[in-house]
Image (cartoon, rainbow, N blue to C red):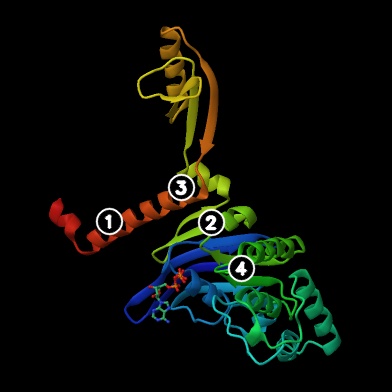
């Protein structure tokens, strides 16, 4: 549904995106995560046809992203969504539906359905009086007035309270279940973990890792084993009536078992702990940062000098 190949975008001397490839499939929720300045917003805006690529190819729903006909298949939620403050949600959303030539009756049905599902009851007061969460809901409803196949949401849940965040995150999942393709960027990794089929981790204008969370865990993650023992061993922590130690492999668990049996004890419990998305994110961006530093050194010719 969305394919991005060799995307590069520069602003003068600033390289915002330096060679990104993405492939977002029909009906999936795809998360773009990465630290500030990684190039997420630039990538999303290029996909929406709002920023022209310096190089590379971007296709959405079978159209080149710069083709105006593509807009009919797309709903975009920008990171900051300034609304017309004096308009009510209903008049504001009707205004956008008119821009897409959606017949009034169809538009009113879609607007009411979206606001119902987002739990926004206040529809006839000026948007300027609304809280941040209510405004975000209106902006999300706006992304749906043309009934698009593809939704591109830039930080949809950032800065919202937990209840509104949950509404927005659950709604995103429902949209995908109804067959829409959702690409979104996020800082809060917990939401990404809860809602995404696949993710791409961006760093320094590149995709540093991509796949399902399980794929990424397999590549960058680690498992730790927390072992409970009946006898004290060097380094073990006393916990209630037993002792605990953390090791990084099953071989080490077996070595502990032999040691504790040697002093007349036994292993009574083993619990595993997988890397959280937070751990993975730090591992990936740390590795990507080292690779970027290495590239810079090579570009500066330090590599040859050292050799
Ligand atoms: N219009 C612009 N002019 C100049 N530089 C820009 C412009 N837009 C983005 N950049 C730069 O490109 C880089 C990538 O920015 P981008 O906004 O795409 O990152 P991001 O991952 O979305 O970050 P954030 O999470 O902070 O929004 C940054 O260094 C940014 O300063």
- Label 1 or label 4, whichever comes before in sequence order: 4
Disc 1 and disc 4 in contact, CB within 8 angstroms: no
Which residue is tagged 2?
189
Tell me the quarter of the picture where residue 198 sits. Answer: bottom right
Asked whether, in this view, residue 202 is left or right of residue 73, the answer is left
Say which mark, if any, is on residue 86. none
Q: Which residue occupies the foreground of this view, 186 or 289?
A: 186
Sequence-earlier tag: 2 or 4: 4
Near mark 4 (Cα within 10 A), the count class, few <14, some 14-19 or many ≥20, is many
Where on the image, by quarter, is ligand 1? bottom left
Label 4 within 8 A of ligand 1 by Cβ:
no
- Distance between the Cα atoms at labels 1 and 4? 32 Å
* Quarter-of-image position of residue 14: bottom left
- Left or right of 100: which side holds 11? left
The x and y percentages for residue 252 are: 42, 23
Q: Give whichever of discs 3 and 2 has the lower sequence position.
A: 2
Task: Identify the residue shown where x is 77% and y is 63%.
Answer: 178
Q: Which numbered disc covers residue 294? A: 1
Residue nearer the viewer, 26 or 64 = 26
- Which mark sits nearer the N-terminus, 3 or 1? 3
* Residue that badge 3 annotates: 279
Q: Earlier in the sequence, mark 4 or mark 3?
A: 4
Extreme-left residue of the structure: 305
Please indicate whether residue 145 sits to the left or right of residue 68 in the image.
right
* Residue on which disc 4 sits: 2
Q: Are marks 1 and 2 in contact (CB under 8 Å)?
A: no
Number of the front mark, 2 or 4: 2
């Amino acid at each position: 549904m969305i394919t991005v190949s060799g995307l590069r975008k520069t602003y003068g001397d600033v390289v915002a995106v330096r060679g990104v490839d993405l492939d977002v499939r029909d009906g999936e929720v795809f998360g773009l995560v990465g630290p500030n300045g990684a190039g997420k917003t630039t990538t999303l805006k290029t996909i929406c046809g709002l920023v022209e690529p310096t190089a590379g190819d971007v296709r959405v729903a079978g159209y080149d992203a710069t083709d105006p006909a593509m807009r009919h298949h797309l709903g975009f939620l920008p990171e900051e969504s300034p609304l017309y403050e004096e308009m009510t949600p209903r008049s504001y959303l009707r205004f956008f539906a008119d821009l897409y030539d959606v017949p009034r009756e169809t538009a009113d049905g879609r607007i009411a359905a979206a606001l119902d599902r987002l739990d926004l009851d206040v529809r006839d007061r000026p948007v300027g009086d609304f809280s941040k969460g209510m405004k975000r809901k209106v902006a999300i409803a706006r992304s749906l007035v043309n009934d698009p196949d593809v939704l591109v949401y830039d930080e949809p849940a950032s800065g919202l309270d937990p209840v509104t965040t949950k509404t927005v995150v659950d709604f995103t999942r429902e949209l995908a279940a109804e067959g829409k393709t959702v690409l979104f960027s996020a800082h809060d990794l917990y939401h990404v973990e809860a809602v995404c089929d696949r993710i791409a981790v961006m760093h320094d204008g590149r995709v540093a890792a991509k796949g399902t969370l399980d794929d990424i865990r397999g590549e960058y993650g680690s498992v730790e084993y927390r072992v409970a023992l009946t006898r004290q061993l060097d380094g073990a922590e006393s916990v209630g009536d037993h002792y605990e130690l953390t090791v990084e492999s099953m071989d080490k668990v077996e070595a502990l078992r032999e040691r504790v049996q040697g002093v007349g004890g036994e292993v009574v419990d083993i619990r595993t702990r997988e890397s959280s998305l937070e751990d993975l994110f730090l591992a990936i961006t740390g590795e990507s940062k080292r690779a970027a530093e290495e590239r810079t050194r090579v570009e500066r010719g330090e590599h040859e000098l050292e050799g």
